Amino acid sequence: MRYVEHKAKQGERWDIIALSYYGSRQNIRAIIRANPQYIGLLSFKGGEVIHVPILEEVQASQNTTLPLWKR
């Protein structure tokens, strides 16, 4: 999977990263799955390199037959 590297800022959260790259918080799980080393963090200390999957690839890998809350 291709991704963009994002350097986290102090206090930044997963949902803020998703919002800044995707324009919504919808694909937050894809970002978390791409960064298992940080899975327990709610917010970042700053300086962590986060892999943000490229949106087209994330959408192509999702099962669109399931309702959004089950994906």
Image (cartoon, helix red, strand yellow):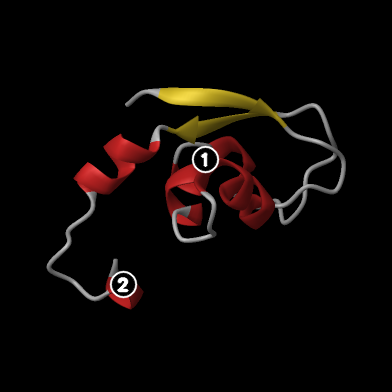
Q: Amino acid at mark 2?
A: Leu
Out of 60 and 44, give the one closest to the viewer.
Answer: 60
Mark in front: 2 vs 1:
2
At horizontal 72% and vertical 56% (from top left) the residue drawn is 42
| Residue situated furthest left in the rendering | 65
Q: Are marks 2 and 1 in contact (CB under 8 Å)?
A: no
Helix, strand or loop at label 2? It is helix
Q: Position of residue 19 (x, y in %)?
A: 60, 52
Distance from label 2 to label 1 (Cα)?
22 Å
Q: Position of residue 56 (x, y in %)?
A: 30, 37
Q: Which residue is mark 2?
A: 68
Indicate which disc, 2 or 1, sits on the residue closer to the N terminus. Answer: 1
In the image: residue 18, left or right of residue 47: left
In the image: residue 5, left or right of residue 46: left
At horizontal 82% and vertical 36% (from top left) the residue drawn is 9
Answer above or below: position of 65 versus 45: below
Mark 1 Cα shell of 10 Å, populated few (<14), some (14-19), many (≥20): few
At horizontal 72% and vertical 52% (from top left) the residue drawn is 13
Mark 2 Cα shell of 10 Å, populated few (<14), some (14-19), many (≥20): few
Answer above or below: position of 13 versus 38: below
In the image: residue 29, left or right of residue 17: left
Answer above or below: position of 34 versus 15: above
Q: Amino acid at mark 1?
A: Pro
In the image: residue 67, left or right of residue 40: left
Q: Which residue is mark 1?
A: 36
Helix, strand or loop at label 1? It is helix
Answer above or below: position of 43 versus 5: below
Q: Which mark is residue 64?
A: none
- How many numbered dots are placed on residues in this image? 2
Q: Position of residue 58 (x, y in %)?
A: 32, 43
